[in-house]
Amino acid sequence: MFKKCAFRLAVWVCLVPASVLAETPQALPTPIETALKTLPQSCPSMLPGLEPDALQRLSSFYDTLQYQTVWNTYGMLDGLLQQFAHLADDGLDPAHYQPERIREQLYQASATPLHRECSDILTSHNYLEALHHLARGRLRQADVEPIWRSPEAPERDDAQLLLQIAVQGLADLPAAFDRARPAHALYRDLRAAYAELRQAAKPAWHPLPAGPTLRAGMSDPRVPLLRELLLAGAGSTPVMDLRYDDELIEAVKGFQLQHGLEDDGVVGAGTLGALNVSTANRLDQLRINLERLRWITRDLEPQSLLVDIAGARLIYFRDSCPFWQTRTQVGRAERQTPPLKSRITRLTLNPTWTVPPTILQQDKLPLIRQDLNYLARHQMRVIDAQGNSLDPHQVDWDNPRGIMLRQDAGPANPLGQIAIRFANPFSVYLHDTPSKPLFNRAARALSSGCVRVEAALQLADLLLAESERETVATLLQTGKTHEYRLARPTPILIAYWTADADDNGQPRYRPDIYKRDAALLRALNTAR
């Protein structure tokens, strides 16, 4: 993604055919206008039960075109059908847009006027819906994978832009579909990878049998099949060689990197499971993540932070291009990092840590009950609701009420030297951490919901204006806790997806740490 960050810029000229924009008498409604206003009664067999949003799109579209028929030539209809077919590369089902019913219009020379008007409306409905699905997603994100948004970061209203694309696109349908399609490299690269895999020949799939963990130097009857899976066509050693040799180990390491696994070259349960995912299932995984990226790229602002939950990384964007990234640690499955969009407004320098209620109840109290000295060893103070220190020996630890635990700033503080704050109802934030060795793990769903950032101080520099950096550095050196409000808030998007494409255009898969893929796949497969 860092190598390729190109965005198509186009000058759009409205070249709608003159017949579409021909002026009509204002006194009488056109047949199209009459049919639209009496839907679905006017076209009961073609357009039953349209959603209010779809009706509004149709009304706005035809109103802009003065309620004239649109699909007047075979060339336009044929061009539209071609664009519907290309939607398969976006993970959308072309059949949903009723190409067969639209194709019938090519052979309906004797159709009644009302039938022609209904056919025109039907075609426009599918055209508008296809553009809408490309730009905003086949499903409503709020229905399947909701995201919290702060009042300062509302969902973008692009209805007028889509209407403009639809009207102007009548003169150039391929350009209309391409303009509706997300322009972001995240989406374009994954679409290309999905299209290549979808269109590639599908050899017979043979899962790798279970067996002992495969390590360097071993011989195993499964090695020839493993070699075929990973090195077919790469000039590998003879296929019946049972040795797990250096060439195959390197191929396994590459596979592990592409699938979010420890790249140790050891074929254990995790690697075996990833190897045994069929091509059909991988295509499904790419398809559902194209849907997610249609949502995500709408929320991603030109200069912003993107936290990739499943990939355990943070990307800083400038001018819509990835400028910098670092590794993260995210919430465990039982304490998930929530998807959200907000704005980073302040930094806490040398932060204290007030133990959240869930962690206090589930993690800390059992340890304190076993050994009260746990508090002193971890520099924790017991405080009341007003922040006053309490004697831990005077607290009923079997039934503590009205208390909190606070850990003072310092090297052992789990928030490290800095916390990066943004409005949200989950009390989550980004922060530094003393647990640096954990960033070397491939699986980094380790926190209680907040996002630990490997290069947190470097990230803070990116968020600060040049004039602020010296001040913040001085405050950090004091070792005292300070709240610092940023001169320019930065948008942050925390999002969940489990597949994208690497810099070479190859699919890159991630474990579905929060087990969300199956529900999204069901929703896509059953969408009406």
Image (spheres, grey):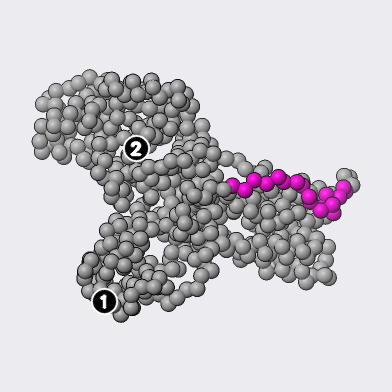
What stretch of residues is rendered in magenta?
A: 7-24
- Residue tagged 1: 242
Assign a secondary structure to mark 2: loop
In the depicted structure, whether residue 18 falls above or below residue 221? above
Picture quadrant where residue 115 is located: bottom right
User: Front-most of 348 and 116?
Assistant: 348
- In the picture, the disc for residue 484 is none
- Residue tagged 2: 455
- Do the numbered discs 1 and 2 sit on residues whose CB atoms are within 8 Å? no
User: Front-most of 228 and 367?
Assistant: 228
Q: Which residue corresponds to the image point at 46% horizontal and 59% vertical from the top-left? A: 506
Looking at the picture, how far across and down is residue 299, in whole percent?
52, 42
Could you tell whether 420 is left or right of 388 in the image?
A: right
Q: Which residue corresponds to the image point at 25% horizontal and 44% vertical from the top-left? A: 437
Residue 115 lies in the magenta-colored region: no
Q: Residue lying furthest bottom in this view? A: 240
In the depicted structure, whether residue 471 falls above or below residue 517? above
